[in-house]
Amino acid sequence: MDLNYIIRTKKFKTKKSLGQNFLVDSNVIDFIAKSTSSFDEILEIGPGIGFVTEKLLEKTKKVVAVEIDKEAIKELKKNLSSYDNLCLIEQDILKTNICSLPFEKEKIKVIANIPYYITSPILAHLLGEIDEETNPNRNKIEEIILMVQLEVAKRICADKNSKNKEYGQLSILCQMFCDCEIIKIVPKNCFSPVPKVDSALVRFRVNEKPKVKITRLLKRTVSAIFNQRRKNIKNSLQNAGFLGVVEALEKIDIPKTLRGENLSIEDIQKLSAALEEYN
């Protein structure tokens, strides 16, 4: 814990409505900064009052920081006025076209310590939807380092062999387009105010192409089998209005008694392709 960071945080009125919990552990901040050393241009989402931002500015040529809180913007301007490689944008990241931001490089890295309640919408905004073979925002990004709740981090990185029902739609969305890994677990006392749960840093390395071929019914298939995850695949798909479910499962040799959480991304893609014949 860094006393200077804690004192600066205490002077700022954090807003629960924006999910503001500022990272105040200098070791974790340094870890994030070091992980960006190979990049010239960085998009920082939710810089808050600039503890991570300051370290990034010391190690990279340009940081574009998108922040929605007017008071935080004032603090950033006051505390980081000496840096000429910072571009501050007061805007909602969910309404921001990443390609319109003032970057010169073809590819950028994204750093984000965001309100946890909008983790899924932000990931969908950065990566696109499950059935989008190409997406302008995703095409602009080479790598993302994202601070999320530890339980969400486990869901992002889960596969069909994971325990405790961690594998689901979020896993599919992220791994369809990225190689994902937890790179650091961050205890809750590394933040101020202290949140109720531990966090983790997840690295997303964005691939040039989706992991599997995008099919017409892929997104609908994923939704169906995970929205009713306690049911077997046959019942989940039939309840979602799919036709020819038994025939499609037999065609690709998937037992109808399995649950969606037992299928890999490749299995789900084969299933969605098989269902196209009947739907």
Image (tube, rainbow, N blue to C red):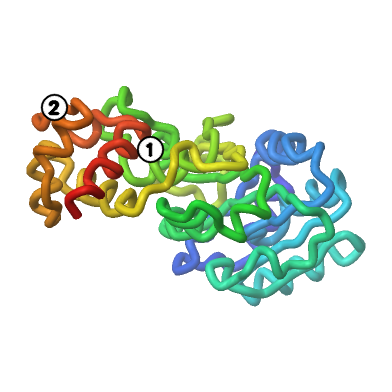
**Up/down of 146 relative to 73, above or below:** above
* Residue that sits furthest to the top in the current view: 161
Q: Where is residue 107 in the image (x, y as percent from the top left)?
A: 74, 50
Q: Disc 2 on helix, strand or loop?
A: loop
On-image quarter of the N terminus: top right
Residue 30 or residue 45, whichever sits in front: 45
x 68%, y 44%: residue? 142
- Quarter of image, res 163: top left
**Between marks 1 and 2 in the image, the one whose residue lies nearer the viewer:** 2
Left or right: where 116 falls relative to 45: left
x 63%, y 69%: residue? 97
x 31%, y 41%: residue? 168
Q: Where is residue 225 in the image (x, y as percent from the top left)?
A: 21, 44
Residue 255 shows which numbered tag? 2
Amino acid beneath label 1: Arg
Is residue 231 something one can see in this rendering?
Answer: no
Amino acid beneath label 2: Pro
Q: Position of residue 262 (x, y in %)?
A: 24, 28
Q: How crowded is mark 2: few (under 14 residues within 10 Å), some or many (20 or more)?
A: few
Residue 29 or residue 3, whichever sits in front: 29
Give the alpha-carbon distance from disc 1 to disc 2, as whole Å. Answer: 25 Å
Residue beneath disc 1: 155
Q: Disc 1 on helix, strand or loop?
A: helix
Left or right: where 246 falls relative to 145: left
Residue 82 or residue 93, whichever sits in front: 93
